[in-house]
Image (cartoon, helix red, strand yellow):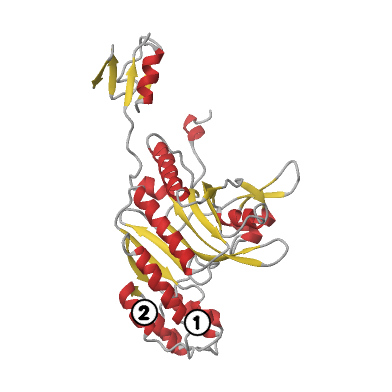
Amino acid sequence: MTDPISKGLLPEGFRDRLPPQAEAAADLLRTLLDRVSAHGYERVSPPLVEFEDSLVTRLSSARPQDLLRFVDPLSQRTLALRPDITAQVGRIAATRMAHIARPLRLAYGGPVLRVRPAQVGPQREAMQMGAELIGSDHVDAVAELLGIALEALSAAGLADMSVDLTLPDLVGTLASGPWPVTTPLADVQTALDGKDAAALQGQDASRYSALIEAAGPAESALTRLKSLNAGGALDTRIVGLERLVATAAPHAAVTIDPTERHGFEYQTWIGFSVFAAGVRGEVGRGGTYLVRHPGGGEEAAVGFSLYVDGLVDAGLGASRRRRLFVPLDTDPEVSAKLRAEGWTTVSALTDADTPKRLRCDYTLDGEELIKL
């Protein structure tokens, strides 16, 4: 005999969102998108599934085994479920919207699915929301996106935020210019990833230890970076960091880690992560990158992604709407008027229906609203 409980089980890493969390997720997504669209970002909605080779080509560090794949019974080609929406927006910008004047401002929101859960949680399905500015990676564009991300999160009710700024291409730039290395660059980057000054000393790359020491609160980090002799390679980056610190400071505490690379493999000169008290893992991340065009060539872009599920799990957007019990034989126009005033009406269908049974906060008695 089949165990009836097994019929309700879900695959590992997936879950149902029940009331009121499901509605909270929808409300938060709507709030975030509304704030972004107010700055001129137009919404696009890519499909959940694409051809596998297309996704692998556009996703950074993606391999076929990193995607949830299946064979399309119509085309007999391998399809894959998207693990990220940013690359899809880049595809749209480079193809169907290639003729639109730049900078092109686009926004999105929808589910993504991963083969393996993220390090910060067990879930393999997530709700991702974000915005992309295609056609520029100037510091003004980055400041716009960073400011919008923090504004949107504040509107969603998030407080006690912090922003971590990083320079993903800095080590490569220094190694190819003022700070050459004799050992493989990958070894130097691995040592920096582990904040291992001793390993850098052994690789004759001890000057890179100064970048480890520069990590920390924005003010002290900038002071240390300004003191480094890097042949001018740091000058424009320091100016950019100062601009972004000024943008983020009214909303969040700011730190700088000039060598952080994890999760920023496809970013160019700047990357940022957003954290908040009470939210597990990152709230979001963003930075500059390159969009590839089908016929060759690339164009600069900057964007961010926010993760709605963490906000829901932190209790945001979960305010329960007032449910009003409407007895049998109530005039439909009365219910319509109450809904127009913001009430959620729950109508009785039989004599057995009661306010308690239908989980209502109020009941309608004639024209009077009675709180239960």
Looking at the picture, how far across and down is residue 277, in whole percent?
30, 56
Q: Amino acid at mark 1?
A: Val
Looking at the picture, how far across and down is residue 68, in whole percent?
60, 50
Work out whether residue 146 or residue 274 is closer to the camera in this orientation and state it: 146
Q: What residue would you read off at disc 2?
A: 214
Depicted 256 relative to depicted 66: above or below: below
Of the residues tagged 2 and 1, which is closer to the observer?
A: 2
Q: Quadrant of residue 258?
A: bottom left
**Marker disc for residue 188:** 1
x 36%, y 76%: residue: 215
x 59%, y 54%: residue: 89
Depicted 175 relative to depicted 161: above or below: below
Left or right of 355? Residue 125 is: right
| Farthest residue, direction left | 371
Looking at the picture, how far across and down is residue 1, in whole percent?
53, 28
Work out whether residue 44 or residue 58 is closer to the camera in this orientation and state it: 44
Q: Is residue 283 visible?
A: no
Work out whether residue 313 or residue 119 is closer to the camera in this orientation and state it: 313
Q: Quadrant of residue 206?
A: bottom left
Q: Secondary structure at mark 1?
A: helix
Query: The C terminus lies in which quarter of the figure?
Result: top left
How far apart are the alpha carbons under marks 2 and 1? 17 Å
Q: Amino acid at mark 2?
A: Ala
Looking at the picture, how far across and down is residue 55, in whole percent?
64, 56
x 53%, y 59%: residue: 133
Q: Earlier in the sequence, mark 2 or mark 1?
A: 1
| Farthest residue, direction front | 101
